[in-house]
Image: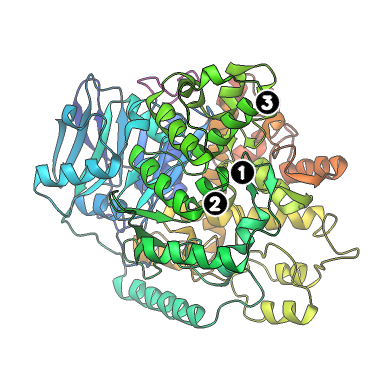
Amino acid sequence: MMRYAETGFNLEIDLSSGNIERVATDPKDTELYLGGLGTNAKILWDRVPPEVEPFSPDNLLIFSAGLLCGTPATGCNRTIVSTISPQTQLMAFSMMGGFFAPELKFAGYDKVVLRGKSPGLVYIWINNDTVEIRDAAHLHGKGAIETAELIKKELDEPKAQVAAIGLAGENRVYFASIEQGRSSASRGGIGAVMGDKGVKAVVVRGTKDLNLARPAEFMGLCNEVLEYIKFREENPIPGVMPILAGLGSPQEMKVHDEKWHTENFMWGNSRTRRKDFWTDEVAEKWTDTMETARTRLISCFNCSMKCGATIDMPGQPTFMMKCFTKLTYTMGAHADLEFGLRIAQKATEYGLDGFSAPQVMAFALELLEHDILSADDFPDMPEDSQGRFFYLLEKIVRREGIGDILANGTYWAAQAIGNGADAFAHNTIKKHEQLPLKLSMLNPIYFLMYSTGEKINITQIEGQFPQAPFPKREQREEFVKDWIQVPDEKFKQYFLDWEPRGENSIPYYPTVQMTCEIVDWQERMHYIDDALGQCAGLSSFPLKPPYHIHNYPKFISAGTGIEMDEEKLTMAAKRYRTLVRAINIRRGMRRKDEAPPANHWKKRFPELEKELLDTYYKFKGWNNDGIPTKASLQELGLDHVAEDFIRRGILPENDDTSAEAA
């Protein structure tokens, strides 16, 4: 049977035995779980029981192209990497942009599934139908970007796409990333699992065609999206911060005005707010630093957005940077932007998550300051803050001395250090470091997203509903006029009635029920993106994006030939979103784990927070402990999950809790 938009084949590689198989996939799975994250979740549920540890040979590491990757759909290029995370002990799914996923499709595969462990360091070379496991001993300890360049030379394949780890991955640092040309998959420590499996890189070159079911219709949809992107570029949204006014993944490389980030986000170990930091002098200096370092703005496969940039710091190899890494090291070390770009370059070569790494370093220095760690724990450490960060970077990636403990992230390091250290690991959700953001008044929408999100990364949960009410009703009326992206007209009314103060303001407005609906819509769009391989920057993250719930079903139908409508798409997303949750529930996650950092908001409302969780769980079809009920699992065709839960005693035999379906 001809498959459209996808290849219909996964590449299964057993690293322990060296066995390589090209395995046909079931088209029924595409209909039920779409692709990318959806089918990854199904594989992990089916093949990785909760007894399997992250560093076990039985854990899988899956590189998956999204369902529409490699088609002409603008910005559809995400590789979804999934495994069981060493840091959270839950399912990790990290996205990377760039060119890897389309290349994998052109080589004839939708996924690469790695199992087992290689006896020595290897890389995998996929060249259409030829797949080899090759020795990588000579690449041991090399940087991730350097590795990519060396492999391309060695193979004489300048167009090959390389996803590689640096020293952090080889040494199983819990927040190690996988770097790939112009992107990285950072969250959840997937680079550590890759290192544990003995894989230095996965390299792919593909020259095959990908078929579309109804090409003319598909191209028409693509042209509509391009027209809309052009319209939005010429008409930025007024009254919101620069990175939300346009499209694309946060435009940090393009935008020089960092007043909002530097004055609202926290410095050091997510403790210090510097309200008057952004002066004319700082603005001028930072603009100059950025203009000098940034060689050009760049895009991912088949996208015109230019969200990333190549950064060139004197005496260091050029690297690609995007989004908030621009500021994380700078703010963690209370330093300037020039330092931030220099250390980020080094950390990228080592392959580290740019959100976690600076927080871990700032955490270590705070423990030293409070005598929980002593000077003896940091032999020969420089006196200055910048020097200390470079020192800690080396210790962590090499797992030397105190670096060996810090390499497990703030949560696990605090457990190992004891002596009150856990009070300093204060910015984690489900054991994972968050954006360093501390605010005043509880925001019910963000409370639910932070608490229940299993991507454990706020920028990958939030999105299409504005972050705050606009000051004047006229502005809100103007905003909703062409707000075609809403799944239901009621969302326009919710926004119109949202006031900055008074009874229709935070925390009691949007109401609990409205909040549940808003959060569910935002999450649904991210989950659809992660199955289709679409960059959130053109769909779930910005206000008024070109891709939304009304045109996605058309893209899927014309691309794959599977008839899709909004209801069916919503059900599919709900099905694999529930399966992700089921994997994590089976690994022990419960309601007690669903909380934002305790100090995230100064003003908290415990009764409201309880009501929010109670209502949202019910709305999602979960019981009071956050476990999907038998009825809601059956409604999604996940009867086998319900049976497994009953067999394990997670749900009672006679669970007839009828959670109201959303």
Residue 293 x %, y %? 37, 60
Q: Earlier in the sequence, mark 2 or mark 3?
A: 3
| Contact (Cβ within 8 Å) of mark 2 with mark 1 | yes
Foreground pick, 398 / 54: 398
Callout 3–callout 1 Cβ contact below 8 Å: no
Q: Which numbered mark, 2 or 3, is in the foreground of this view?
A: 3
Q: Residue at x 32, y 69 (%)?
A: 214
Q: Where is residue 610 drawn, in percent x and y? A: 82, 40
- Tell me which secondary structure the magenta stretch mostly adopts: loop
Q: Residues within 10 Å of mark 1 (few under 14, many from 20)?
A: many
Which mark sits nearer the N-terminus, 2 or 1?
1
The colour scheme used to paint the residues is rainbow
Q: Is residue 162 above or below residue 221?
A: above
Q: CA distance from mark 2 to mark 3?
A: 34 Å
Which image quadrant is residue 290 in?
bottom left
Identify the residue under disc 1.
Answer: 453
